[in-house]
Amino acid sequence: FTSGTQEGRPIDRLLGAMAEAFGLDHRAPAEPPTDAKSYFLERVFTDVIFPDRALAMPTARAARRARIVELSAALGLGALGAGLIACAAVAFAAADARAKEIIEEVEQARTEADLAAAAERYRASAPLERALHMECRAQLPRRVASGAIGGAP
């Protein structure tokens, strides 16, 4: 990285190389002769690029806006997560309460007709619980859970 030299315009060199590759006669437009330009890369970096690095940095306003956006996104995701957890907890509590209610009703049943009525009420009231796999079928007595009492589930 000490120095580099550029002669002519880059597009002229490109067109010349393409013309040569295809066997065409390429003549660059006549231009007044210019001296080759030397670029000393070390000076470019130390005198131009590094001193001007602050020009490419975000402004204080942009940095503050970015922090606000990041904080808002984090708070929004946190609120969304808390909301989902709360919904799941409420749904679980409701399903648990319904399971206890059904178990109590089944345990208090005296006859097969009472069990059949309990099973029918369970089947009629549980489509959402079944869709969410939160039903209490595993906790019910085997005869009711299998549908042997009260018809097919």
Image (cartoon, rainbow, N blue to C red):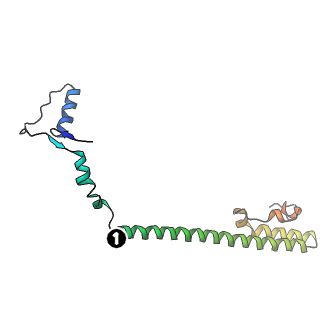
Residue under the image location 25 percent in, 52 percent down: 46
Q: Is residue 109 above or below residue 137?
A: below
Residue under the image location 82 percent in, 60 percent down: 152
Q: In the image, what residue type sits under mark 1?
A: Arg
Q: Which is more toward the observer, 146 or 74?
A: 74
Q: Is residue 66 left or right of residue 141?
A: left
Residue under the image location 83 percent in, 65 percent down: 139
Task: List the single residue furthest toward the right.
Answer: 110
Q: Position of residue 25 (x, y in %)?
A: 14, 27
State the residue position of label 1: 61
Q: Is residue 1 left or right of residue 148?
A: left
Task: List the single residue furthest toward the top.
Answer: 23
Residue 127 occupies which quadrant of the picture? bottom right
Q: Label 1: few (<14), some or many (≥20) within 10 Å? A: few
Q: Is residue 49 above or below residue 70?
A: above
Q: Which is more toward the observer, 94 or 34?
A: 34
Q: Which is more toward the observer, 138 or 14?
A: 14
Q: Position of residue 76 (x, y in %)?
A: 51, 70
Quadrant location, the N terminus: top left
Quadrant location, the C terminus: bottom right
Q: Is residue 86 left or right of residue 79?
A: right
Secondary structure under badge 1?
A: helix
Residue under the image location 68 percent in, 71 percent down: 89
